[in-house]
Image (cartoon, rainbow, N blue to C red):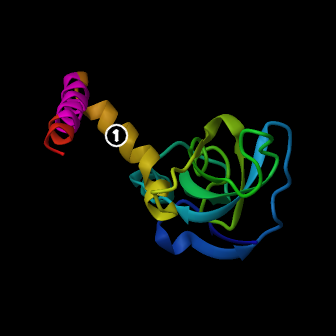
């Protein structure tokens, strides 16, 4: 498989396109064919050497979307569209590749009305919004949309 791998942690010139073997399914992991990889500030931080000292070489990318190929069981049968986020790209190889093995508990099914590129960017964006926004903002937004839905149904 093809992968963009950081050979050193010294900047973007350290990223190299390499050919690697397709990862094998192991206990508790699901083989996913990557259709979209999210790009986050963490990738930059790692690449320029401002993060912990990960083992090199390392495939960056800690969030992504793809299609389950093997090992998902009844919850994620082959062909399921999934998104995920985790320690990928920081403590283990990440999503800047064609195939990845993902812990089953890190997977989430992608709704039919969300494309893979959008889904690949949801996990970190959602986490960031949750961390920086006080809970009343989420509660207010939920109540607003619920009321809007009620108002709209009354006019139909």
Figure check: 87 above or below 48: above
Q: Can residue 62 be seen in this view?
A: no
137 magenta-colored: yes
User: Helix, strand, or loop for circle 1?
Assistant: helix
> Which quarter shows the N terminus?
bottom right
Give the quadrant of the C terminus: top left
Residue 69 shown left or right of residue 113 in the figure: right
Q: Nearer the viewer, residue 77 or 26?
A: 77
Please tell me in which quadrant of the rendered image residue 79 appears.
bottom right
Residue placed farthest to the front in the image? 156
On the image, the x and y values in percent for residue 148 come to 17, 37
Q: Is the magenta stretch mostly helix, strand or loop?
A: helix
Magenta residues, as a range? 136-150
Measuring from the top left, give residue 86's x and y in whole percent.
57, 41
Q: Name the residue under label 1.
A: 128
Residue 146 lies left or right of residue 5; in this view the side is left
When the figure is inspected, residue 129 is found, relative to residue 59, above or below; the finding is above
Instruction: Please tell me which residue is depicted at 81% across the width and 64% down the height of the picture.
Output: 22
Would you place residue 122 above or below residue 6 in this image? above
Does residue 79 appear left or right of residue 120 in this picture?
right
Can residue 55 be seen by looking at this rendering? yes
Q: Which residue is drawn at 18% across and 27% down?
A: 140
């Amino acid at each position: 498989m093809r992968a963009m791998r950081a050979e050193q942690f010294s900047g973007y010139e350290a990223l190299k396109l390499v050919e690697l073997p397709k990862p094998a399914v192991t206990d508790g992991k699901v083989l996913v064919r990557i259709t979209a990889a999210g790009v986050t500030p963490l990738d930059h931080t790692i690449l320029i050497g401002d993060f912990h000292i990960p083992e090199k070489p390392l495939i960056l990318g800690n969030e992504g979307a793809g299609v389950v190929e093997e090992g998902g069981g009844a919850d994620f049968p082959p062909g399921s569209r999934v998104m995920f986020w985790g320690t990928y790209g920081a403590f283990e190889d990440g999503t800047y590749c064609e195939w990845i093995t993902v812990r089953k508990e890190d997977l989430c099914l992608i709704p039919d009305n969300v494309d893979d590129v959008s889904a690949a960017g949801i996990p970190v964006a959602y986490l960031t919004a949750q961390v920086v926004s006080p809970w009343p903002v989420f509660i207010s937004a939920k109540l607003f949309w619920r009321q809007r839905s009620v108002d709209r149904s009354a006019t139909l």
